[in-house]
């Protein structure tokens, strides 16, 4: 199976081409870029590099969220367009799962910085999710995982190292980037999604929507999306 996988859910852009679980090409851009202008050129470059045509693709795997609102919209819209146009499978995988490395014992907690000392967090043991992804304050996350004997924080940990050291001195931490190769491998064995109804997993309303809801009554029939 020829798979195109990509993650635009946050600052890094990760793209990979995989055939029958073998990596054919991969690119990760860790610097902050505009994914709307760099995603398709990156895909095109990798496709040309390995000699693939769009018609060769059999499955699209995309990081479905949580993460950057704009980044998720770009990734999901691109994935849906490609899958629909080519008539191939579409699979969504948690953006947090792509941050989890192999071979780490105990509870692994991938995090994405959601600003204002809040994070998107996942909970994994042996790369298997043991609890649903969540949006919460970092203080709440530290309290929640304090009952585990061995905890390793991965992903966007740089801004939270002092808090980890102070609250959980025995916990480990490791900054990791999303792996589009692992995303493709996970997507090869995951259930496919219906293309038209496929949507990002935001976990948190965009700030503009939150502000709008504060100004409107709960029984207001008109939703924010309808309004805009």
Image (cartoon, rainbow, N blue to C red):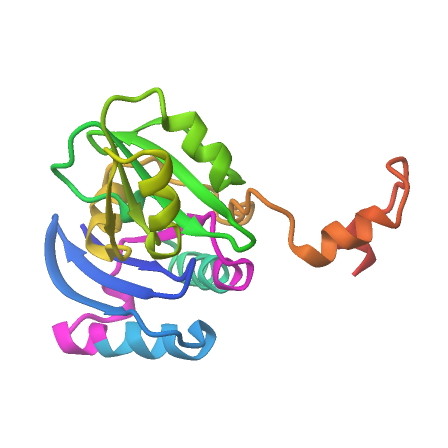
Front-most of residues 110 and 68: 110
What x and y, as percent, mark residue 168? 32, 33
* Left or right side of 201 for 152: left
Q: Is 221 displayed left or right of 150 in the figure?
A: right
158 lies above or below 221: below
Q: Residue 199 colored magenta?
A: no
Give the camera-side residue of 37 and 207.
Answer: 207
Residue at x-position 18% and y-position 50% = 1
The percent position of residue 155, horizontal first and vertical second, equals 31, 50
Q: Residue at x 47, y 74 (%)?
A: 36
Where is residue 217, by image quadrant? top right
Question: x, y (%) of residue 57?
Answer: 26, 60
Please state the horizontal and vertical placement of residue 47, each as a whole percent of the image.
22, 72
Q: Is residue 49 visible?
A: yes
Magenta range: 46-73
Residue farthest front in this picture:
166
- Find residue 141 and report its image quarter: top left
**Residue 91 visible at all:** no
User: Where's the C terminus, which quadrant?
Assistant: bottom right
Question: Is 50 left, or right, of 76 in this rendering?
Answer: left
- Judge whether 19 appears above or below 167 on screen: below
């Amino acid at each position: 199976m020829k798979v195109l996988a990509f993650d635009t859910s946050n600052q890094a852009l990760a793209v990979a081409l995989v055939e029958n679980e073998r990596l054919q090409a991969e690119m990760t851009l860790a610097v902050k870029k505009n994914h709307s202008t760099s995603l398709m050129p990156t895909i095109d470059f990798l496709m040309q590099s390995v000699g693939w045509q769009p018609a060769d693709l059999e499955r699209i795997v995309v990081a479905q969220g949580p993460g950057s609102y704009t980044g998720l919209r770009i990734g999901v819209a691109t994935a849906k367009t490609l899958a629909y146009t080519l008539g191939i499978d579409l699979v969504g995988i948690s953006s947090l799962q792509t941050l989890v490395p192999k071979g780490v014992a105990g509870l692994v907690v991938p995090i994405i910085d959601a600003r204002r000392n809040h994070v998107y967090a996942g909970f994994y043991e042996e790369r298997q999710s043991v609890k649903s992804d969540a949006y919460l304050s970092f203080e709440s996350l530290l309290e929640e995982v304090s009952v585990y004997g061995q905890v390793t924080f991965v992903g966007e940990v740089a801004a939270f190292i002092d808090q980890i050291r102070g609250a959980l001195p025995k916990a480990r931490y490791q900054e990791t980037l999303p792996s589009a190769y692992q995303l493709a491998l996970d997507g090869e064995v995951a259930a496919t999604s219906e293309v038209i109804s496929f949507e990002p997993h935001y976990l948190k309303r965009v700030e503009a929507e939150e502000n709008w809801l504060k100004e409107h009554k709960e029984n207001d029939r008109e939703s924010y999306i309808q309004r805009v």
